[in-house]
Image: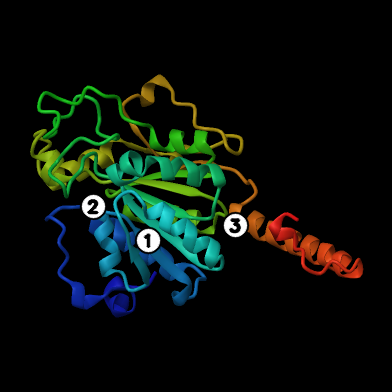
């Protein structure tokens, strides 16, 4: 695998560096994993697009030297959907934070999953709204403190991958910033999947989450992620396609990593263009019949 230092001018906008992320933040680890995965994939550089919303992780599009879109809060998937339908040959990765994706962008998230459109969603879950001041998000663990939950969060967090699966996503995986090599493999698998794919990348915010909850240093938090993670790759995975792993009692409190589910379903963009082709042929045949009948002013798009 190529050295990121050697290839950084190709993959990074070096004039934008240094980055704004806090010391110990996992966003750089996840961004580097994305670069290394793309480097090994058979994609043309010009065909790769990275779309992001608003938040700490979404600043990655400013540093990545691909075609990029830094969009509005919660709307990254909406922008990406339009782009994919207009340019179906593009390989589109969508980077979002937990609040960006699951709160203000939650509606777009479930409908992108329902459509099974070929977008590669990477959700950087730092358990908090980092950039806006440390408010709790829909993925903040119950009981954890935040600026909007000084006594601890009362709400149960979403299981993001189960939510995506129930809505229709056909690929779901989880990795952590504590295991960047696994992240690379998961991104590669995600990139090769046709359909809406979701990768949850866990990276505890060392500033807004860690300090308020006395989680220790950034290194301590990475170590905690590593110790609590159980890899399906290492444990062996004999599930049927599309089935979620059977979580036994001895795994309670652990973080399951790896590909949790994958199945094949019709992809929305391909279905969309097949419909256009079918309707175009039907319209052409209808217009020929109308001309033959001497009624040339009518067209099927007008419903006449």
Task: Say if mark 2 contacts mark 1, CB within 8 Å.
Answer: no
Q: Position of residue 134 (x, y in %)?
A: 14, 41
Residue shown at 26% from the left, 40% from the top: 225
Q: Quadrant of the N terminus?
A: bottom left
Q: Give residue 55's mark.
A: 2
Q: Position of residue 283 (x, y in %)?
A: 77, 62
| Figure coloring | rainbow
Q: Quadrant of the C terminus?
A: bottom right
Q: Give residue 117's mark.
A: none
Badge 1 element: strand
Q: Position of residue 190 (x, y in %)?
A: 48, 54
Graded by Cα atoms within 10 Å as few (under 14), some (14 to 19) or many (20 or more), the crowding at tag 3 reads many
Residue shown at 8% from the left, 34% from the top: 214
Which residue bears the numbered disc 3?
269
Which residue is more in the foreground, 107 or 168?
Answer: 107
In the picture, measured across the screen, residue 130 lies left or right of residue 298, that is left
Which residue is more in the foreground, 12 or 85?
Answer: 85
Give the Cα distance between marks 3 and 1: 18 Å
Which residue bears the numbered disc 1?
51
Q: Quadrant of residue 174?
A: top left
Badge 2 element: loop
Q: Is residue 46 above or below residue 195?
A: below
């Amino acid at each position: 695998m190529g050295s990121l230092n050697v290839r950084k001018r190709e993959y990074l906008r070096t004039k934008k560096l240094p980055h704004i992320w806090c010391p110990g933040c996992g966003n750089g680890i996840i961004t580097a994993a994305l670069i290394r995965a793309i480097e090994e994939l058979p994609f043309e550089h010009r065909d790769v697009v990275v779309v992001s919303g608003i938040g700490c992780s979404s600043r990655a599009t400013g540093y990545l030297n691909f075609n990029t879109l830094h969009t509005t809060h919660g709307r990254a998937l909406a922008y990406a959907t339009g782009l994919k339908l207009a340019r179906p040959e593009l390989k589109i990765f969508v980077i979002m934070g937990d609040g960006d994706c699951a709160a203000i962008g939650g509606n777009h998230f479930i409908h992108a999953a329902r459509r099974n459109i070929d977008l590669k969603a990477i959700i950087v879950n730092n358990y908090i709204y980092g950039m806006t001041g440390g408010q709790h998000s829909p993925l903040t663990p119950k009981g954890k403190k935040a600026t909007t939950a000084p006594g601890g969060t009362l709400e149960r967090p979403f299981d993001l991958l189960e939510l995506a699966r129930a809505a229709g996503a056909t690929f779901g995986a989880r990795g952590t910033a504590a295991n960047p090599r696994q992240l690379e493999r998961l991104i590669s698998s995600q990139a090769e999947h046709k359909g809406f794919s979701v990768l949850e990348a866990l990276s505890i915010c060392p500033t807004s989450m860690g300090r308020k909850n006395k989680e220790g240093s950034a290194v301590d938090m990475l170590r905690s992620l590593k110790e609590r993670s159980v890899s399906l790759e290492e444990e062996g995975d004999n599930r049927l396609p599309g089935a979620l792993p059977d979580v036994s009692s001895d795994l309670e409190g652990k973080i399951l990593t790896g590909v949790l589910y994958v199945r094949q379903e019709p992809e929305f963009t391909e279905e969309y263009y097949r419909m256009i082709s079918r309707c175009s042929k039907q319209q052409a045949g209808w217009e020929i019949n109308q001309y033959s009948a001497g009624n040339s002013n009518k067209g099927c798009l007008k419903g006449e």
